Each structure stands twice: as C-alpha cells, then as structure tokens.
Amino acid sequence: MTVIAATAIAVSVFVSFQVASELMNRKLLDTAEDQLHADSRVLATNAERAGLAQVPLPPYPGSGRLVRVILPDGSTRTPAGQPELPPVSEQAGRVAEGASTDLLESADWDDGYRVYTLRTGDGAVQVADLADDSPINEFGFGMLVIGLLCVAGGALVGRTVARAALAPIDRLTAAAVRVADTRDLDADIPDEGGGEIRQLIQSINDMLAALRESRQAQRLLAEDASHELKTPLTSLRLNVELLIRLDRRGTLDSALPAESRTRLLHDLGAQVAELSTLAAELTEVARGDVSDESTELIDFADVVVAAATRARSRMPDIEVALDVSSVWVTGRPAALQRAVLNLVDNAGKWSPADQPVQVRLRAAGASAVLEVDDAGPGIDAADAPRVFDRFYRADSARALPGSGLGLSIVQRVVDAHGGRVTVARSTRGGALLRVSLPAASAPTASAGFAAGKDTAAR
C-alpha cells in the first residue's frame, strides 16, 4: 500500500507537471507574440513617418528586443551594438516585396529567435526576441521539488494508514497461526476492526464454531460406536472362546450336542451379520454428506422397487407389499435406495409375520411422498422425537438386532435431497414413516412409460 500510494502520487505529479508546463509554455508564447506584434507596429509607424532609411534606431541597450529594417533594395539596417540577427529569410523577403503583410518565424531558426516581420512602405520592419526557457525550467524544478516532497509525504502517510488498517489482519493471522499450532478451536478471534475485516473475522469465527461442532460430533460418534461395538464383540468373543476351549479339551461333541452347536453357530452368524451391518452403517455415518455419487434425474419408483427387492432377500419371512406410482426426482440413486432399504428393514423388525410391510409411493403436489408402515406396536410418543438420533434405541427395541443408525442415515439422506421425514402411527396400529422429496419434471420421452408404471406388488 505504501508503494502504491507513492507511485500514485508520483504519477499524479508527473501528469500535472506535463499539463501545467504545456499550458504555461503556450501562455508565454502567446504573450511574447503579442509583445512582438505591438513593438513591430510602433516601429512601423515611426518608419512610415520618417522613412525606412531615416527612421531612428537607438543603440542596442544590451538586452531586450532586437530590431531590423529591411529596405526596398533588400539591404538591412540594425541599431549600433546589436547582436547580428540571422539572415533575412526568403519568406520575410517576400513580405518586404509586398507578397504578404506580416510573418512570424520561429521553427526554422536554429538560434532560438522568434522574428515577426511587418510590411511597411516599400520594405518591412522586423522585431525579434530570443526564446527564453528559463521560466519553464524554473517551474519544472519547483514542480520536481514539490513532487518529491509529495511522494515522500504520501509514502509516509500510506505506510501509516496501511499499518493502522492492516493491524487487525496481522492479529487475525497470528490468531489463525495459534489455532493451527495448538489445535485449540475454542479460542475465538476478537471481533475488531470494521467493514470487510470485521466480516472476515466473523466468518473465521463461524468456521471455527463449525469445526468445533464437527469435532464434537466425531467424538460422540467414536464414543457411541465404541459402546455399540462392545456388546456384539464381547458376545462373539465369549462364544468363540467357548468353542476353542471345548475343542482343545476334546469335549466339543459331548459338551455341546448337535442342537446346541447349531444354535451357537446361528448366534455367531447373527453376531457377525450384526457387526457387518454396524460397520457399514458407521461408514455411512462417518462419510457425512461427502459422496462421489453424482445427482441425476431418476424415477423414484425404480429406486423403491429395487430397495424392496433387496429387503425381501434379507428378510424372507416378511412380506413387502408395494403400491408405487412413477414420480421423478433429482438425487443420488444409491443413497436414496439405502434410505428406502433402511425404512423397510426397520418396519420388518416390528411387523408380525402374517402382516406385510406396506410401501406406498405417490405424487402429492410438487412432492414425491413415500410411506412405509407396519402392523407392529408402533412408536411411543416419548420416543418419537428421538427416533432419528444416532444410536438411539427405544427400550422396547434393545432386544432386537440393530445399531440405532438406520433411521439416522435416512434422515441425513433425505435432508441432503432437500426433503423431510416424519414419523406417525399407521391405521394398522404400527409405525408410519413418511418421506417427502421435491418432485421433478419427467422427461418427455418417458411420459408414455410413466403412465403405465403404477403397480401393486407383493
């Protein structure tokens, strides 16, 4: 900023000097020409009275104007002691001969004279002066001194203002370096300064607050995951240790009858499946909103049907009834399918074997509405506000498999797609989970296909 201020002042002074010098030079030239005209007219008047050959020419005083009389024969008269002027030019000679009334010459004279020739009688008179650049030089020197002083003063003022204006930036930089070195996200940067600097500090404080929340969420996720992993891992370890101990003793067959071994192996398989599910859900939660999958225009009905097909293969004892209509949305197909699968899995845990899980999809205004309900005991009013929290499990659900992450993932996916998920009680007495997503316009080429997409399947 100091260099910029000094440079700007230097450029301003230079431009001002050029303009002022040009204006001053023009003014001096105009004044000198006016004076030449006036002096030549006085000399011409005297020559007309006394004649060109007899007009008195006082001795040259040593400085000032130079005069010369051009006689009809082309000869010249000059005052005694006057410096010799350049020879009469061809153009001035023609003026003396009557070709013109007057002439001002300066560009073609090497000695720097300005000569004004005025026709008088049968000849002419000339008045000349020596071009004097001293006023311009003195003016330029004065402007140079003033310019240097202005540049120095501007640099000093610019540096002072810059240091005062950038002092909050220096403190902000120091605070940012301190946070980076200490990893202390709890130390807010003091809100000082004004304008853009204050906005910058507030933005950085907001960023630090977001980082604090993210770190807290990571800590809670690690603690909750550790707690959730402890139970299935302990059970799995005890069962495996039991099998190893009995096998080493050679009493595996006698101590565990075939029915007990089958039940134990079934428990081990269920525990491994539960750990796999929990690991996948933890990975999904830890990824947050970061996904490499791109959004695209999709028929939500295809996603629901695919999720229901996967749910049937995972829960062969539970019937899934579909009643879906073609509704187009913009989103990530894999993420939406995972959310729908979690909804169906959750309903399958509670639905009696003789009651299907009902999945309905329809268009409602500008939204695509998905409903999944079961005929289970439903969700208590006290648990409804927390069913979408991570790792939250109602007291009645602690005996069932699961980690409490499924519905949390559903809410995150729905929020990422600009939708809303709610919980209510279905007409069959169970839980009704409803997802609303912004609908999109169907491709024109698919209009005929969409009309035949409505289906009800079991």
Image (tube, grey):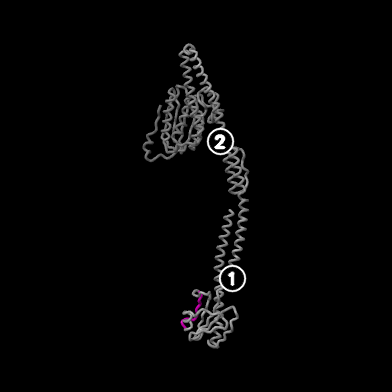
Query: Of residues 42 and 365, which is closer to you in this image?
Result: 42
Q: Is the residue 250 above or below the residue 58 in the image? A: above
- The answer to the question of whether label 2 and label 1 lie on touching residues, with beta carbons closer than 8 A, is no
Crowd band around label 1 with a 10 angstrom C-alpha radius: few (<14), some (14–19), many (20+): few
The picture places residue 309, in percent across and down from the top left corner, at 41, 28
The picture places residue 377, in percent across and down from the top left corner, at 51, 24
Left/right of residue 2 with respect to residue 330 in the rendered view = right
Q: Which residues are magenta?
A: 98-106
Circle on res. 135 = 1
The picture places residue 418, in percent across and down from the top left corner, at 49, 38
Per the image, the residue denoted by label 2 is 214
Give amino acid for label 2. Ser
- Residue positioned most to the top: 254
Q: Is residue 78 magenta?
A: no
The picture places residue 167, in percent across and down from the top left corner, at 62, 48
Query: Of residues 193 and 237, which is closer to you in this image?
Result: 237
Mark 1 residue element: helix
